[in-house]
Image (tube, rainbow, N blue to C red):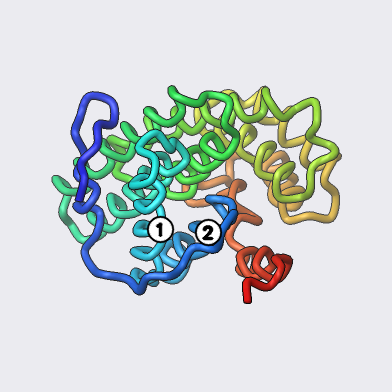
Amino acid sequence: MRAFVAGSFVFVACSLFTAAAPQEQRPKGIPFYTWVREDMFAGWMADDMTRFERSMQKTEEYLNENADNMDAVNWLGAGAVFRAVRAFEAGDAAKGDRLFRDAMAMMDKAAAAQPNNPGIRATAGGTLMFFASKLPERHYRGAVEKAREHYAALYKAQEPMLDKFPLHLKGEALAGIAETEFRVGSRDAAMAYLQKIVSGMPNTRYAQIADAWVKSPENVTKKDRLVCQSCHEQGRLAAWLSRQPSQN
């Protein structure tokens, strides 16, 4: 399997894979994230490593077609974060450190190449915040600060249109900027964003959590999370496929 350069290191893609996953035929014209996301999240949420490996293999197909596909490079970085967390949980600190460094380098490479790509910013920021509390303390602060960079760029680009966005896009942009500011200690900025969520997204899970953080910031733990409240629903792939004309 082909090796590719990410930043200053050479990363061999097959090192991410430990088991073969069933192959699927990619539908013509399907968006990248629609095709890969649900299998990745099945690994994250249900520890379904067969589906996780399938997401990684699907991503490799895109890279085999175009080595400059930064969405795919970034997605492999997100997968490497998950693998790093699993290594740390298994007690293999050296492997976890290596995978985490590789993950950060891949996501940095993608963001540097396409700084205005919202998919890259949202995926990198969301991945780092989703797993931050499971990282060793030596990686926690760096992960949060890098996520803050991604969310700041995403929010800056989307702020003028935010109120027109659906719940997921609006919620994640605001939640990301609010939580990362909160985690790095910028409490005044964090409170302003949290209040935006409370007032602008009533009767949502985002508003419920934000309101609790505003009222009792001292009770917020490292494991509490505002981001990723609407990221992992199943069915988006099926919905896309159902809208396509028959290929028969």
Expressed as whole percent of the image width and height from the top left, the position of residue 55 reads: 41, 60
Q: Nearer the viewer, residue 69 or 211?
A: 69
Expressed as whole percent of the image width and height from the top left, the position of residue 115 reads: 52, 24
Q: Nearer the viewer, residue 235 or 27?
A: 27
Q: Nearer the viewer, residue 70 or 189?
A: 70
Does label 1 or label 2 sit earlier along the sequence? Answer: 2
Amino acid type at image mark 2: Trp
Judging from the image, what secondary structure is the residue with disc 1 in?
helix
Residues under labels 1 and 2: Cα distance? 8 Å
Expressed as whole percent of the image width and height from the top left, the position of residue 37 reads: 51, 57
Disc assigned to residue 35 = 2
In the displayed image of the protein, which residue is found farthest to the front? Answer: 248
Q: Which residue sits at x=43%, y=61%?
A: 44
Residue, disc 1: 58
Task: Assess disc 1: are there few (<14), some (14-19) or many (≥20) residues with their C-alpha within 10 Å of its C-alpha.
Answer: many
Q: Which residue sits at x=28%, y=50%?
A: 84
> Which image quadrant for residue 118?
top right
Q: Which residue sits at x=20%, y=41%?
A: 3
* Above or below, comparing residue 228 to residue 9 in the picture: below
Judging from the image, what secondary structure is the residue with disc 2 in?
helix
Amino acid type at image mark 1: Lys
Residue 241 can be seen in this image: yes
